[in-house]
Each structure stands twice: as C-alpha cells, then as structure tokens.
Image (spheres, rainbow, N blue to C red):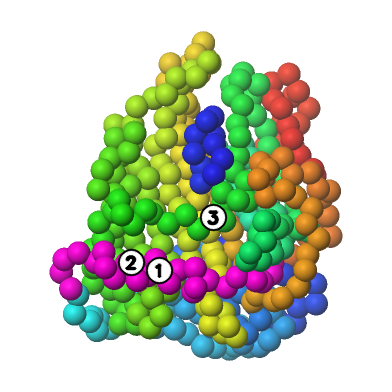
Amino acid sequence: MKHIVILQLFFICGFSYSQNFQISKIVVDKNTKIPLENVTIFNESDFSTTNAEGKFVFVSKKNEINLNLLGYEPIKTTFDRLKTEKDTVFMESKATQLREVVVGNAGPYMKKVYDKFQDNLLQNYTIDFFLRNVFKKDKVNILLQDIYARKNQIKGQKKNLTIEILNMRKTSFFEKNDKINFGFPDFDGLLSNGLPQIDKCSFTETPFNDSDFKKILFEYNEKDQSGQIQRGYFIINRKDYAIVEYSLSFIEDPEKVPYKTVSRGKYRTTKLEKFVQFTKDSKSNKYYQSNVKIDNQVDIIVYKISENPFNFDFTMDFFVTNRPINEKINSNFAVNKDIFRAKFPYSKEFWTNQNQLPLTNELELFLKSVSDKKDKTKEFEVISNF
C-alpha cells in the first residue's frame, strides 16, 4: 500500500443509461432506528449498498430488490412495492439463536479458513465498480475523486489485476502554505487481500446472532513499531469456511503513537482501518471482493507554520455494481500508480445522468468552495478535470 507523507494508507452500486427501475431509500434498525451501513442491495444482475447514513440508490432492469445484512432478517421485495412505502426501510435483527461458542483458542479453526482462502476466491472475472476518494484537512474537504471503472482479475498471470477507467471526476485545492507533498494509494494496495499473519495472532470466537456464520476476533500477540496492538474480526461462513467480511484496525491508542520527523515537520498516524466484504457468486459458488473501505487519519505539524497539528483524513469507498462476468477489458491505468494522478476527461453527461454515486450536501458545498477559490492562485493550488 502507498503512503501519505511516507505513511501507510490503506458504495455496492450500479449504473446504466438504459435502466428501467430506480429507487432511493434509507435503511435503519427496526428497534434502535439507527441507520445501517453496508447493507447489500441486489438482484440477479445488479448491486448497491448503504452508506454511513443508511442511504442507498439502486438502479436495475429487473423489478426485484433484496436487502441483506449479516445478523438481520433478509428482505425480498420489488421496486414497485418499495415505491409505495415510506422513505425508510426497517430491518429486523435476527432472533438470538446462538450456537455453542467454544471458549478458547480458535487458531486451529482459522488455519482451516486460511488454507481454504485462495480456493474460495473467484479467480478469473471482470466486474464494474465505483470508487470514491475523499480527503479532509481539519474536517474540511480539500479533495474529491470519483471513478467509474472495470476490474479484471486473472489467476496465474504476471499482471493478474488490470483496471480500465471509464469515467472520472476529481477536484482538489491545497493551501500553498502547507508545503506538504501527499502520495495516495494505488489499486494494488487498495484491493490487496492482505490477511493478518496467522502465526502472529490470537483468535477467539465470540457470540454472533446468525447461526450460519461464525465471528472470530483476532489480535496480534506483540505490539508493532508504533507500540500498537493490531486487532479486528472475521465473519466466516460455517458451511465452506469462506471469509465473508473482515475488519482490521492498526491503531489501538492514537495518543501513544510517536511522531516521525521529516524535513519540514513531523507526523503520526492516529487512525488506520480497513473493512472488506466478499460476495458469493451464485454460478461458481466462489467469492469476490464487493466492498472495500479504508479510513486513514494522520496528524501533521509543519515547522514555521503552526505548532499545533493539522489533522488529515483520507477515506476510500470501493463497491461493485454488477455480478462477475467473463470479459476482457482495455487496461488504461497502471495498478501500481497513485490513483489521484489519473488523468481522464470529465463527462458531464455521465455524471449528470448517473444516480448511484450522489454528491452529499457536504461535497456540494466543497465544490462550491473550490469554484470560489479557483482564481486565488497565489493562495491555493487547484487540480480539477471539471
């Protein structure tokens, strides 16, 4: 994975100009009314997912919608039926029917999971996806990049991952006084399946209210160079030992992370998390990455600018838009290249007509702010393709 200032970094939607059905809703927990993130919205051909606010937009040629989230009762409905209901969809938590949890070391079980990991993965396929990258300084947006592209994964080839970018919009403005050179991740780092090292971790099963799956907590046995214990969890399908979800957090106590010195200042990572979901392909019974989220925060002190740190927050949301197909793509962007360095023209027609990666109110305000500052070239450096 790439770095922010030598620092490690680490939405499922669909799009079609010929869509027949389209809907937007908010999904919440029936009892708590809390918005539910990462709810899978799908049918036989298309996918979407809910964001942190529980909102989703779904477009498909088929009048069929399924909502699924681990630990909740699935919902099977149609566009027509949902359109007659309120804007909010309520999902009900599954009744607690916990299987017996074996207290103790889950290491032997996880060894079986790791041994079957590659065999459970779909190896040769193509999917379409959206990727949204957002960069903030002190909670204020300074960068937005949206990409609609295709990904081809082929086992056994030297270049087993290729990317074809179909449409892109990006804009950013940086204060020239910051004097900070940022490097952003590449597709290799974003889409890598780097699991925790099994021989350096402890694994413990914990109760989970879905009897078809196991939830396994893990943590590293020793602290890393920053004095942190990396930890997270796996959700495992009991039937085939397949990983359907995992989360990894690299920072346990951000206040104890030491600063690292560079030529113009110093920095430290205060948050670094990665979340990955896998979806099972119904034709092959193999799994593929369908949702990847990364959140990386860093404090930076720039000498001669401020004694107090600036907080930078970089997030990435990757989500597929269709079921896997066997189709070649025209690779047009190196997978080991800084993603923000991609240079592709802006298509007003595409971004105006697509409905599944909407701009939030916050991002709308950001774009207006960029427009207001674009002529202030002495104070700001503006990079944009629209």
Q: Where is residue 60 in the image (x, y as percent from the top left)?
A: 69, 79
Residues at discs 2 and 1 in contact (Cβ within 8 Å): yes
The residue at the point 51 percent across, 46 percent down is 10
Quadrant of the rendered image containing residue 218: bottom left
What amino acid is labelled 1 in the image? Asp
- First to last magenta residue range: 102-128
Name the foreground residue: 246 vs 62. 246
**Which of the two labelled residues, at mark 1 and mark 3, occupies the earlier sequence position?**
1
Helix, strand or loop at disc 3?
A: loop
Helix, strand or loop at disc 1?
A: helix
Front label number (3 vs 2): 2
Front label number (1 vs 3): 1
The residue at the point 69 percent across, 64 percent down is 152
What amino acid is labelled 2 in the image? Lys
Exactly how many numbered labels are in the figure? 3
Say which residue label 2 marks.
Answer: 111
Q: Is residue 225 above or below residue 216?
A: above
Q: Residue furthest left?
A: 103
Quadrant of the rendered image containing residue 150: bottom right
The numbered mark at residue 192 is 3
Q: What is the C-alpha distance between the residues marked 3 and 2?
A: 20 Å
Q: What is the C-alpha distance between the residues marked 2 and 1?
A: 6 Å
Name the foreground residue: 106 vs 207. 106
Say which residue label 1 marks.
Answer: 115
Q: Position of residue 311 (x, y in %)?
A: 47, 32
Q: In this view, does 153 lie above or below 378?
A: below
Asked if one can make out residue 139 in the rendered structure from this viewpoint, the answer is: no
What amino acid is labelled 3 in the image? Ser
Q: Position of residue 174 (x, y in %)?
A: 65, 29
Asked if one can make out residue 67 in the rendered structure from this viewpoint, the answer is: yes
Q: Report crowding for label 1: few under 14, some 14 to 19, many 20 or more residues within 10 A (C-alpha).
A: few
